[in-house]
Image (cartoon, rainbow, N blue to C red):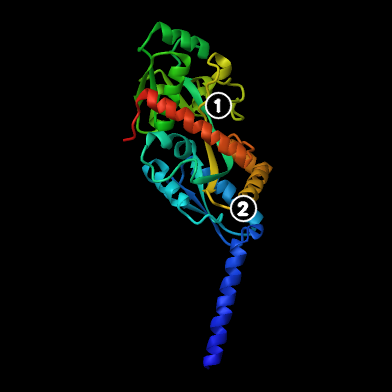
């Protein structure tokens, strides 16, 4: 009986070691479920692309991709969890412009390093905002808006519904060299509604929410805030091509792993993400939800994050914005 017990224990150890070796072997990734931490509540703009792409990755890999919503502190809770997770590719985070661009300067005492504690993999979607105005505002484009604002310093009002939209408005003010009053609201929906009602004149509204209102004549669209025209409202020019060169303030959503994750695993996930987002049904679903679909290498994504951190740090400092 003792010999049998020893054999059983030895066999169990061998099986455990084999399983560990298989799990740790980057060339065999993935051999078990992959967890994607979404650092915000279910149903938000970062949750949707994670679930769309996660479901397709599950199909492609034959392994479950589990979406784990860990909201709190502007995305800090979920991001910190992944920064400190085992660097084996089985715990990823759906990062955003907020978590990996703005928070680095908005929250000076983060428990992780936004750049050095993560390995960027690939962006999944870009969500641009559209610069909307109340129909009564006597402007038809950005050039006319800048001219009007310079003639009425401090008189035009601009609603914001969160840190990203507030900082985008602040960046526009400084890039266009105008003086407008930014009015904070508790959420983007309220900020757009305030613009539609005429409480304020301007807003950077989400395309999915704003486009139907523009079509109905309740708002007018002046420009989109991305580097390129949006695939969703391609007829609307960018702010940069409308008289404010260099302006870009779109929001991105993408997968990142802990920093020491093997390069082969990062490249493996990147390859699958890039392949999956180009599937017609995935692209159509993302575009229908007002996401543009970028194609990134890990290096391109990392470079974009570095630029974002530097850009938003400058805006936060100049505007004197502090996290509540």
Outermost residue, left side = 324
| Residue located 59% across and 30% down the image | 232
- Image spot of residue 26 (x, y percent): 63, 57
- Near-viewer residue (78 or 261): 261
- Image spot of residue 51 (x, y percent): 54, 48
- Examine the rendered structure and indicate whether residue 14 appears above or below residue 283: below
Outermost residue, top side = 151
| Residue denoted by label 2 | 265
Circle 2 sits in a helix, a strand or a loop, which is it?
A: helix
Answer whether labels 1 and 2 touch (C-beta < 8 Å): no
- Image spot of residue 79 (x, y percent): 45, 46
The quarter of the displayed image where residue 126 is located: top right
- Examine the rendered structure and indicate whether residue 32 appears above or below residue 18: above
Between marks 1 and 2 in the image, the one whose residue lies nearer the viewer = 2
Q: Is residue 26 left or right of residue 178?
A: right
- Examine the rendered structure and indicate whether residue 114 appears above or below residue 31: above
The quarter of the displayed image where residue 200 is located: top left
Mark 1 neighbour class, 10 Å CA radius: few under 14, some 14 to 19, many 20 or more? many
| Residue denoted by label 1 | 226
| Residue located 42% across and 37% down the image | 104
């Amino acid at each position: 009986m003792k010999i049998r017990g020893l054999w059983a224990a030895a066999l169990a150890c061998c099986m455990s070691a084999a399983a560990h070796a298989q799990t740790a072997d980057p060339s065999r990734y993935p051999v078990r479920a992959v967890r994607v931490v979404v650092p915000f509540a279910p149903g938000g703009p970062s949750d949707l692309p994670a679930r769309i792409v996660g479901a397709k990755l599950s199909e492609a890999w034959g392994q479950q991709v589990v979406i784990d919503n860990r909201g709190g502190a502007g995305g800090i809770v979920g991001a910190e969890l992944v920064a400190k997770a085992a660097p084996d590719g089985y715990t990823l985070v759906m990062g955003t412009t907020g978590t990996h661009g703005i928070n680095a300067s908005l929250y000076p005492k983060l428990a992780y390093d936004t750049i050095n504690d993560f390995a960027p993999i690939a962006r999944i979607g870009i969500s641009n905002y559209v610069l909307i105005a109340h129909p009564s505002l006597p402007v038809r484009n950005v050039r006319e808006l800048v001219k009007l604002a310079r003639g009425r310093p401090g008189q035009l009002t601009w609603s914001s519904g969160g840190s990203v939209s507030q900082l985008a408005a602040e960046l526009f003010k400084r890039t266009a060299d105008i003086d407008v009053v930014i009015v904070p609201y508790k959420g983007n929906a309220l900020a757009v509604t305030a613009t539609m009602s005429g409480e304020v004149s301007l807003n950077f509204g989400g395309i999915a929410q704003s486009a139907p209102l523009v079509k109905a004549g309740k708002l007018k669209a002046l420009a989109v805030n991305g580097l390129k025209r949006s695939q969703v409202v391609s007829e609307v020019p960018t702010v940069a091509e409308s008289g404010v060169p260099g302006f870009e303030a779109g929001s991105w959503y993408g997968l990142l792993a802990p920093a020491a994750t093997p390069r082969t695993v990062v490249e493996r996930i990147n390859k699958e993400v890039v392949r999956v987002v180009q599937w017609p049904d995935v692209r159509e679903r993302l575009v229908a939800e007002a996401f543009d679909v970028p194609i990134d290498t890990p290096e391109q994504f990392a470079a974009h994050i570095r630029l974002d951190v530097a850009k938003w740090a400058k805006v936060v400092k100049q505007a004197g914005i502090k996290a509540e």
